[in-house]
Image (tube, grey):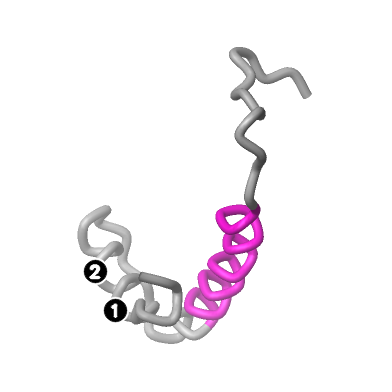
Amino acid sequence: MNNKDINIREYIEQTSVIIDLPIDAEYMPGVIDNLTRIAEIAILVTEFELPETVEAAPIFQP
């Protein structure tokens, strides 16, 4: 499944019910736009292939 297979509006509506966070209709277009952008950016991370020799760091230090 990829992001094109997901109905963002439906996802937001269902998730807002689950987490009890109502979203006014006037704000829904902005929420949809933002989540769509976030999903597009996430593709850059999730589709970036790492070599087999890469190991996860036990402790993250920025």
Question: Is disc 1 placed on a helix, strand or loop?
Answer: helix
Q: Magenta stretch: residue 31 in it?
A: yes
Which secondary structure type mostly characterizes the magenta part of the structure?
Answer: helix
Location of residue 50 by image quarter? top right
Residues rendered magenta in the picture: 30-48
Question: Residue pushed farthest front?
Answer: 52
**Count of numbered labels shown in the rendering:** 2
Q: Are marks 1 and 2 in contact (CB under 8 Å)?
A: yes
Location of residue 24 by image quarter? bottom left
In the image, what residue occupies the spot 21% across and 57% down?
A: 18
Report the quarter where the C terminus lies.
top right
Residue of label 1: 10
Residue 28: image location, x then y, percent: 44, 81
Amino acid type for the residue under numbered disc 1: Glu
- Labelled disc at residue 14: 2
In the image, what residue occupies the spot 45% across and 86% down?
A: 26
